[in-house]
Amino acid sequence: MTTRLPPVDILVVGVGVAGSILCKELAATGLKIVGLERGRMLDPQHDFAMPYAHDELKYDRHSDILQNLSRETLTFRNHTQQKALPMREMGSFKPGECVGGAGMHWGAHARRFLPWDFELRSRTLDRYGAAHMPADWTGQDWGLTYEELEPYYDQFEHIYGVGGKAGNLEGALQPGGNPFEGVRSREFPNPESQRTYAGTLFAEAAHSLGKTPFQNPTAAMTSPYTNLYKMTLGQCVRGGFCNSHGCAMGAKASPLTTVIPTLAKHPNFELRTHTNVTRVDMDSDGKRATGVTYIDARGREVHQPADLVILASYTFNNTRLLLLSGIGKPYDPVANQGVVGRNYAYQTGARVAMFFDDKVFNPFMGGGALTTSIDDYNGDNFDHAGLGFIGGAYLAAQSNGATPIRSISVPPGTPRWGGAWKEAAAQHYNRNFSIYAHGGCQSRRGNYLDLDPTYRDAHGQPLLRMTFDWGENEQRLSAYAIERALEIAKVINPSQLGVHPLSKTYSIVPYQSTHNVGGAAMGADPATSVVNKYLQSWDVPNVFVVGASAFPQNSANPPTLTVGALACWAADAIKDEYLARPRPLV
């Protein structure tokens, strides 16, 4: 029997990076806001207290604050001729399952997307012509420009206390910053991070080759900071255990350190944890959402009526809820029609490892995107004519703070186990660092998300199925980025080099990045997008879908800052336009 609750004004499904900001901004309207989160509430001062926060087995291997795959997972295949099988343990990516979501364990890489990323299709066509486009490409413009989103990037940076150095301030290039970034309206709220020894070697080598190194923007505080919501964060001490972990110092920006404590003070806001939303409920003609149904902590089915429903959960769950609820036409890759599940993309990675006999580094001390980068090969910052691919990668020397188990790197030719491996691991633990290539990923016709016809979750609902493999575009991009990284590595002159290109076939097993995007793409055309430029469903106007699920393809840059900016953008559209007169905004 379903329990029916009294109606509320606005329901937000998922209280992570996007959902927390949407709740906070909309709570200022005085309307009744309910945030639904299927994970548990955390107390950072208790759950991430020293020394317990530095438990690599608990957080990185045993997935303490990540999605419980025994209750719900996804199935995976590389192409439609394979049978998709369930992901049984966290591998390639790590969706969160707690208040704060994946924003609790992110690495604090706080880059904006390039202006080119938002108009990728039209700019590529204008510069290179249709013949340059990848085969089976489904990429598209966002329907939203960088210039429109810039004030919201700025807003989110000041909520999350991002540290960096402006490279393009109101159109004037600034020394020390990234000269390829879009125009900024003002400086970062925090100073740039201090360069490490590895970063210095990388910067000197890159500079000698005519490149422009800069410090990666970071949301791990470079100085004590009080944000727009009067939340104060301490300075990062670079103690490692950042990626996959909560912050023991309260210095990494997350929903729990920047938004939720002050959000909880609003009397018109209610947070409900352990609420697993199973569908968006619709009226009889399927044109209006009436609320959501969820399973509570006691296993009871609950219907919560609402005037406005906002899906702000992880990429996979946003897409799955749309499919389960019948909102939008599911994507058919054979006919290349439909929109929900279309344009799934990931992140293209590669690295060059360098091993030294005469240099010693401290791999343990680091964290919070403590990275020195170049953007000369990112986006369309270089001429792609004749290269056979579009998009690019930024190259970086990262000092993220080595988790001692996962971060061991040994030279090529070392046995995979046994005494020789142990000797090499001990010898090279503090005598190596890598140049990483973080590349974009284009959407292709054969890469998509849908509902699995065989496997179901603990509540009997179909699991989400991922069909994905690297395209020729990503393989060529990776090879090109490796060549550029090798040029820099040879100037640094290590004693040994190890080259780690993109795998020939995508595997869901080894960790790569939690940068999953698409499935509910935004755009200007309802035939190729799920939501309009304001993240509002084309089919059901009182449903908004906010998150990385809206990206039509993936940039080389990490998605979190753009997710936060889109949340600020959508919140203003809802407050200023939709609530005053509920209607399609486009």
Image (cartoon, grey):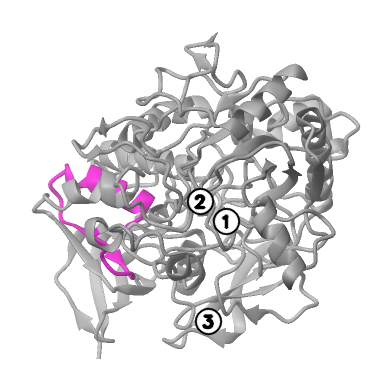
Extent of the magenta region: 15-43
Is 124 above or below relative to 302?
above
- In the rendered structure, which amino acid carries the disc numbered 3? Pro
Query: Could you tell me if the residues under marks 3 and 2 are in contact, i.e. CB atoms within 8 Å?
Result: no
Q: What residue is at 34 percent from the left and 57 percent from the top? A: 100
* Foreground label between 1 and 3: 1
Query: How far is disc 3 from disc 2 in space, using C-alphas?
Result: 22 Å
Q: Residue at x 15, y 51 (%)?
A: 31
Task: Check disc 2 and give the amino acid type.
Answer: Ala
- Going from N to C along the chain, the mark reached first, 3 or 2, is 3
Earlier sequence position, callout 2 versus callout 1: 1
Q: Is residue 562 left or right of residue 509?
A: left
Mark nearer the N terminus (1 vs 3): 3
State the SS at label 3. Answer: strand
Which disc, if any, is residue 462?
A: 3
Residue under pointer 1: 516
